[in-house]
Amino acid sequence: MWVLGIDTSCDDTGVGLVREGQVVVNLVLSQALHQGFGGVVPELASREHLKALPRLTQEALAQAGVAPKDLALIAATRGPGLIGALLVGYTFAKGLAWALERPFYAIHHLEGHIAAAWPEGLEPPFLVLVASGGHTHLYEVLGLGQYRLLGATRDDAAGEAFDKVARLLGLGFPGGPELERLAGEAEEGVPFPVPLRDQEGYDFSFSGLKTRALHLVEKGLPKAALAKGFQEAAIAHLAEVVLRAAKAAGHGALLVAGGVAANRALQERFKEAGLKVHFPPKGLSQDNGAMIALAAWRRHRAGLPPSPLALGATPYWPLEAT
């Protein structure tokens, strides 16, 4: 069974092909034109998706050696995300499903990230932390399509904070990988306060870390030490909240998904925590189409029905409402 998955929720055009739950092709085209703006320009992102998506889909099919008629399921990100960008991939996938008379699955973007990190054999319940440029959410997974929100960021997403602090340090966009590289050059980091240490709940907050970084940059402190100090505080914050939730819920398994999951220092911190931690395979942390195909394949295998083609895309869609 071949499943085609498409993701155009932000600035990455993702097309993936999955066969019986195994990723065969995962193509992601990142849009470099946003670097000069320090962030994603929605209108430009939509136009670039329009240019790239047909070509990328043809390339994915060619790499897998399959024709459109060989596809059994077609899936795309319905939301959340930039609505203009979403509509490009979502409409393209629905049109393909209609033309080929194939079932269509409208997938939640975060369920795609969860599917990318969810190994075969792991049964719910367990916890999942989704940390990316647009999301920082902690869920309890009770089953496929059954999610309970435990906590979320009160302000900025973790990945967005990494990108903005990287920008303050004169690094490129997206800045997460560059900040991690720079942090590795410092022996010690400049101290940063860990947010919300006195809270009883499971929320996150990163705006204070960004403000602290701005003040320290203005003082002219070494950039590598600033990067290391920020990264240490951000990771400590994520780990403390998640571990508190895991202890309260009594769960021993954790998935860490989203672009921030690729950070090696974060991976080491969670591996030391005594939980059974699962991360996405290489190439599946960032936004991509293969994770959308994986989520659709899981839903189909579980007997969950496909989506009506009349269902529209949406920029706001709580995961627990899926």
Image (tube, grey):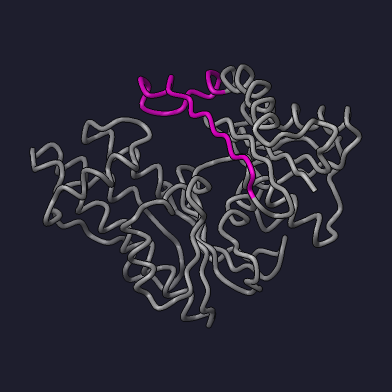
Position of residue 277 in the picture relative to residue 101 (left or right): left
Q: Nearer the viewer, residue 25 or 229?
A: 25
Against 100, residue 122 (above or below) is below
Position of residue 278 in the picture relative to residue 321 (left or right): left
Q: Is residue 33 magenta?
A: yes
Q: Nearer the viewer, residue 234 or 77?
A: 77
Q: Quadrant of the C terminus?
A: bottom right
Q: Which residues are magenta?
A: 23-45
Position of residue 143 in the picture relative to residue 285 (left or right): right
Residue located 22% across and 31% down the image: 170
Residue 30 placement (x, y as % from top left) = 49, 29
Residue located 72% across and 63% down the image: 144
Residue located 75% across and 28% down the image: 91
Residue 172 placement (x, y as % from top left) = 30, 30
Against 166, residue 113 (above or below) is below
Q: Is residue 92 magenta?
A: no
Query: How many numbered marks appear?
Result: 0
Residue 307 placement (x, y as % from top left) = 84, 45
Residue located 25% across and 44% down the image: 181
Residue 111 placement (x, y as % from top left) = 64, 53
- Kindly give the residue lying farthest to the right in the view shown: 101
Position of residue 221 in the picture relative to residue 231 (left or right): left
Q: Nearer the viewer, residue 116 or 61?
A: 61
Q: Locate residue 34: give its quadrant.
A: top left
